[in-house]
Every structure is written in C-alpha cells, then in structure tokens.
C-alpha cells in the first residue's frame, strides 16, 4: 500500500514536470537544461513568499525565516483545523502564486539567450539554474538554505486521510496539466511550436517571431513546473533547497521524456511511469541490491550510473522513445488523408 | 594573497576551457562533463597519494595520461556511435549530461571504495597541507603557472609550426574540406578528446591545492568553465584563455571587494558574478570577446578565423 502511495505521489509530481518539459523540448525544441529552476521557484513561492505573506496577516515576526516559518505553521495549522476553507484558500493561492512566479522566472531566465542557437541556450539555462540553486542552498534568508523552512499543512483538516487526499489532489493536477498540455499541443500555437523545432528559418520566413514563441513556451513550461514544486513543498510540509538538484529535476525529467517519446504526451506519461517504478524499486531494494552485487559503496551512486547509462541506451537504441510522436490530424489534413485513402480504395 | 588565489584559479580554469573549446570545435558538442573530468583527475591523484604515497605533483604525468584515456574512451564509446547515427547537437548535449551523471556516480562510488581500502575518509579532501611554499607564495602558483605556460607554448607550436597542427586546424575549421584533402578528421577528433581529457585531469590534479573537493565539485565548477569559454568566444582557443583569466579574476577579486562592502556572506556567491558576466556577454557580444572587432592588430592575430556558419 505504501508503495502504491509513493508511486502515485512521484508519478503525479514527475508527470507535471515531464509534461512541461515535453512542451518546451518535445514540441518547441528548447533544450531546457534548467528545468530544476522552475520547480525550485515553485518551492520558493511556498516556503519563502507564502510563509511571509501569512506571517504578515497573522502579525508574526521573528529574526529569521526558519523560526518564522515554524511559528507560522503552528498558528496557521490551528486556524485551518477550525476553518477548512482557509486551508483550501491558502492552497489555491499558493498554487496560483507559484505558477505566476514560475512564468515570470521562465521569461527572465530565457531572456539572455533567447536569440541564440540551441547549444548556447542549453548552456545558459543550465548555468542560471545551477547558480540560483547554489544561492538558495547557501543563503539562509530565502528558504532557510540547508536548514530548510516549514510549511503549513493546508489539508490538516482531513486528519488521518491527509496523505491519501493530498496524493489524489496531486494526481488531479497532473491530469489537468496533461489535459492542458494536450490541448495546447493540438492548437495552432502548438503546431507553430513544432514548426519552430523543425525549422526556424521557414517559420521566420512566414512572419513568425521566434523570440516571442520561445519566451511564451518557456513561460508556460516554467509556470507548470512551478506548480509541481509548490505541490511537493505543500505535501512534504517543508522546503529544503538541496532537494531541488539538477539530477532530480532536470536530468530525470529529460530521461522520462526521451524514454517515453519526446513530442508525445501519452508517451511521456508512460516514460514517467516506467521511471518512477524503476526508481522506487531501486530505493526499496537498495540494501538487497548492494548486498547482491557486493557493491562496496552506497546505492545512490549505483542509481546515478544506472540512469546515466539508461539515458545513453535510450538515445542510442530508441531515440524516438516508447511511443513515437504522431502527426496532428487537423480537419483539413483529415480531409486530405480521407481523399487519398478513398482514391486508393477505388 | 588574494591575487595569488585568483591567478591559480584562472590558470586552472584556462586548462579546462582550452579542453572544452578543443572538443567543441572538433566535435561541435559542449561537454557538460568537463567539470567531472577534472574531478576524475583529482581522485586519481588522491589515489596515488593514499595508496603509493606519491606526491600529487609527482603524479601529474600519470594523471595527465589517464585523463587523456578517459577523454578518448568517452569519445569512442559514447559520442562517436551517436554521431554516426546522425544525432543532433541537443541529443549529444543530453548525452554529455548523462555522461556527467555516470561520472558522478562512478567518482562517488570510487571515493567510498577508496575509503574502504585506505581506511581514510575520501569523500572530501584537500591537498593544501602537502604544498610547498617559496618566498611566502604557495607552490601551486608556480606549478600551475608553469604548466599553463607550457600548454600554451606546446599548443602554439603544435598548431602553427607543425604539419599535424595544420591538419588539426583544417579539420577544426572545415571538416569536409579537410577530409577531401586527405586528412583523417577522425584521428584529429580523437586527439582533441585526448588533449581535452588530459588538460582537465591536470587541472583536477592541482585544484585540491586551492579548494576542497567532493564528488559533486564538477557540477559546481562547470558554470565557471562555460562562462569563461563563452565570454572569450567558444569557437576560439585564444578566447578560452582570455575568458578564463577574465572570469577567474573577476570571480575572485570582485567577490573579495564586495565582501569588504557587504560582509563575508557575499563570498559564497562568486558564481553569480560569472553568471552576470555570461549574461552580459550573450546580450552584447554573443560570439565572445575575441570575436568583437576591436580593430587591434594584436587581437586579430590571435583570432583563429573561425567559421560561424556550421
């Protein structure tokens, strides 16, 4: 049962991040090597900003954000217990705040390299994300650095069913994101993004502005990924900067997208499921694996090597992923296809 | 004292940037694992120190060679098969990101393995106690300055005075034409990966004299490496050197002066300076400093006449 819970939790969170990455990389062709940044922004908006807003409302003041957050948690939890609506309001406003800030961060962080080639883009996005991560991790003023901050339990009223309820909410968000991304990618905007991935020059020639398209894609993608960061923080009841590493929130989402099939949202969900299953399996049996293979080191290093090698194998043997990208059938195209197939049959 | 640290850091950064640029020009993939290449070198020299009590300075030739072997292996086993399949730049970049993770896993595992056989903690280490001093200056200052000078002299002789160097430059600038002229471009690529790996390992051998090394150090220094290479101009070897000194000195000196103004806590944020310089460069002169038309004869002589159309 516990395994099922943790599978559902991580599937939901990673599905949101991987789908947002699929929009940016799979559709728009932006190699966002700084995906972790958007997730971190979501966590900051909960742990760093929402906490301060709540403290302001309740008139709490402390010397530092760490003790501030624990006082906020105490008072706000009591208030939510007596008034569940408050918890839902805080939850929804945290998510809104996270997605807004995520969108803003997405725009700001793509600006320096928005005009440049893909390799410059990738390098710059990685560098920005890495530096923000380091600063958040060292500085104790933003979200408490490596000490971390506490977060109020917005669903504390659901008592013993709190975790189940929360995981269902996360899955609901994952479904909404899937629905949203699927709609976007089947819209004219989604087709323009695909066209940009395939050939920027042709798109420029037909009068589209590549810079604006890239900024839009980054803004939407970051806004979505931010939601995952906020949900993760609200669920785990704390924000510790060191849990938003490049490996966990940039590399693994890339692995899921490529494993499932870049440009195919259903494929990405399959990729997420396979990855999360493998990761939970590795975490659960880490002692058995270490003992069985007689590894003279901790399982985490083994996990890194394994997923790194898996990425290489995917890229080499199955670069299109489990599910291949499918063409989008719009009404006019369907007509043409119908005509051709009809002509063949006759 | 602070200048000394800045110079050592810049020297080491220059070695890493030269390697990154070499492989970028010949294989057109930015190597995200360059930082881990260096950390590999650090752990190799730690191994020689712990197991055979060989001083890190004495292990330099072996570590240099091992780094080169790592570079060749990475190219032949990982990148070349993908290039042959016609993988795009983005796919190759993701591959080097995966490689970085594999190396991180390997180095982390190796550090624990080393701890188990030597009985000494090996996850974190520093070589400063093993360094010598001369006239009050640290030994690593002399060693690193000597080595980077040697590398620069070696490269300029190799690239501009030998037939092999001409072939190498030709395959960097126009691989198709070079191939038509009968140059084995593949051999040149392997050679550039050898040099890249070995320069990185060399830098990693000296890095523990300046800062503490952990398995994840590579992912922290990669920001400075990329910043320096792009600021100087990622298509140009001279640019790599110029960028390395610019980033190295500004990271060290600017943070030092800022810490005098705002307090010691600023010292942690030296990478922010790299990032600001990198962003400014990308906005103002995305081709890097050496590609800016300064109308200086000195600079135009340095420019290696690279080609952007690729």
Image: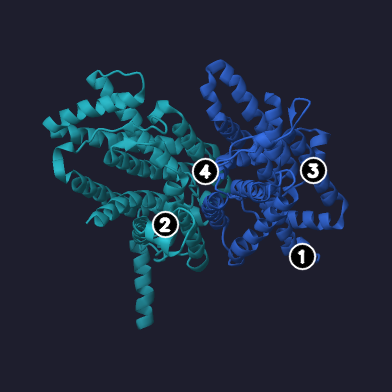
Circles 2 and 3 on the same chain: no
Q: Write down the residue under mark 1.
A: B184
Label 1: few (<14), some (14–19) or many (≥20) C-alpha neighbours in 10 Å: some
Q: Tell me which chain appears blue.
A: B
Label 2, label 1: how many angstroms apart (C-alpha)? 37 Å
Camera-nearest residue between B275 and B124: B124
Residues beneath discs 4 and 2 located on the same chain? yes
Most distant residue in the bottom direction: A346
Structural crowding at the residue carrying mark 2, measured as other residues with C-alpha within 10 Å and reported as few (<14), some (14–19) or many (≥20): many
Pointer 3 indicates a residue of which chain? B
Q: The numbered mark 1 sits on a residue in which chain?
A: B
Which of these two is toward me, A334 or B267?
Answer: B267
Percent of width and height locating residue A217: 42, 45
Q: Which residue is mark 3?
A: B152
Q: How is the image coloured?
A: by chain
State which chain is coloured cyan: A
Asked whether the residues under the numbered discs 4 and 2 touch, taking CB atoms below 8 Å apart as contact, a structural biologist would say no
Query: Whole-Å distance between the Cαs marked 4 and 2?
Result: 18 Å
Across and down, in percent, residue A166 comes to 22, 45
> Which of the two discs, 4 and 2, labels the residue nearer the N terminus?
4
What is the distance, in whole Å, between disc 1 and disc 3 at their CAs? 24 Å
- Quick one: SS at disc 1? loop
Q: Say which label, 1 or 3, has the lower sequence index.
A: 3
Mark 2–mark 3 Cα distance, whole angstroms, equals: 42 Å
Query: Seen in the image, is B144 located left or right of residue A219?
Result: right
- Name the residue tied to disc 2: A257
Residue carrying label 4:
A126
């Amino acid at each position: 049962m516990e395994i099922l819970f943790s599978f559902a939790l991580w599937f939901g969170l990673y599905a949101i991040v991987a789908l947002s990455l699929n929009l940016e990389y799979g559709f728009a062709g932006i190699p966002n090597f700084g995906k972790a940044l958007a997730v971190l922004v979501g966590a900051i908006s909960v742990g760093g900003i929402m906490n301060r807003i709540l403290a302001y409302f309740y008139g709490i003041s402390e010397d530092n954000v760490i003790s501030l957050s624990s006082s906020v948690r105490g008072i706000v939890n009591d208030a939510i217990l007596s008034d569940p609506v408050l918890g839902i309001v805080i939850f929804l406003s945290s998510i809104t705040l996270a997605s807004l800030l995520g969108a803003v961060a997405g725009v700001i962080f793509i600006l320096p390299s928005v005009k440049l080639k893909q390799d410059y883009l990738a390098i710059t996005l990685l560098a920005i994300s890495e530096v923000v991560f380091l600063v958040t991790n060292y500085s104790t003023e933003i979200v408490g650095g490596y000490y971390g901050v506490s977060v109020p339990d917005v669903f504390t009223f659901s008592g013993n069913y709190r975790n189940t309820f929360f995981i269902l909410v996360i899955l609901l968000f994952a479904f909404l994101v899937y629905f949203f991304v699927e709609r976007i990618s089947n819209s004219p905007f989604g087709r323009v993004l695909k066209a940009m991935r395939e050939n920027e020059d042709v798109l420029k020639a037909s009068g589209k502005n590549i810079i604006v398209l890239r900024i839009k894609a980054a803004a939407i993608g970051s806004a979505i990924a931010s939601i995952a960061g906020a949900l993760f923080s609200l669920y785990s009841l704390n924000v510790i900067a060191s849990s938003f590493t490049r490996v966990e929130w940039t590399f693994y989402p890339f692995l899921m997208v490529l494993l499932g099939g870049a440009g195919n949202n259903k494929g990405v969900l399959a990729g997420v499921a396979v990855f999360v299953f493998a990761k939970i399996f590795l975490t659960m049996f880490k002692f058995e694996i270490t003992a069985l293979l007689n590894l003279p080191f901790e399982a985490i290093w083994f996990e890194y090597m394994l997923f790194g090698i898996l990425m290489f194998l995917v890229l080499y043997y199955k670069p299109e992923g489990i599910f291949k990208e499918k063409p989008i059938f719009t009404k006019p195209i369907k007509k043409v296809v119908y005509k051709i197939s009809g002509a063949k049959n006759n | 004292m602070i200048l000394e640290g800045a110079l050592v850091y810049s020297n080491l950064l220059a070695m890493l940037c030269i390697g990154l640029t070499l492989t970028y020009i010949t294989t057109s993939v930015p190597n995200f694992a360059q930082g881990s290449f260096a950390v590999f070198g650090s752990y190799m020299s730690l191994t020689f120190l712990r197991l055979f009590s060989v001083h890190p300075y004495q292990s330099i030739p072996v570590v240099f060679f091992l780094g080169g072997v790592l570079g060749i292996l990475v190219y032949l086993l990982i990148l070349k098969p993908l290039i042959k399949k016609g993988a795009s730049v983005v796919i190759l970049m993701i591959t080097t990101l995966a490689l970085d993770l594999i190396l991180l896993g390997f180095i982390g595992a190796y550090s624990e393995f080393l701890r188990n056989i030597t009985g000494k903690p090996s996850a974190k280490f520093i070589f400063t106690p093993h360094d010598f001093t001369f006239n009050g200056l640290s030994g690593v200052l002399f060693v690193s300055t000597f080595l980077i000078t040697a590398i620069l002299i070696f490269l300029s002789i190799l690239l501009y005075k030998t037939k092999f160097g001409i072939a190498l430059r030709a395959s960097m600038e126009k691989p198709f034409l070079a191939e038509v002229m009968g140059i084995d471009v593949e051999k040149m690529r392997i050679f550039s990966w050898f040099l890249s790996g070995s320069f990185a390992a060399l830098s990693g051998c000296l890095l523990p004299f300046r800062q503490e090394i952990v398995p994840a150090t590579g992912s922290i220094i990669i920001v400075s490496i990329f910043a320096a290479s792009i600021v100087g101009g990622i298509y140009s070897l001279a640019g790599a050197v110029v960028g390395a000194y610019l980033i190295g000195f500004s990271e060290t000196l600017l943070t030092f002066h800022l810490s005098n103004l705002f307090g010691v806590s600023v010292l942690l944020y030296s990478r922010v300076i790299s990032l600001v310089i990198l962003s400014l460069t990308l906005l103002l002169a995305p081709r890097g400093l050496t590609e800016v038309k300064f109308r200086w004869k000195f600079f135009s002589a340095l420019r290696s006449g690279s080609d952007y159309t690729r």
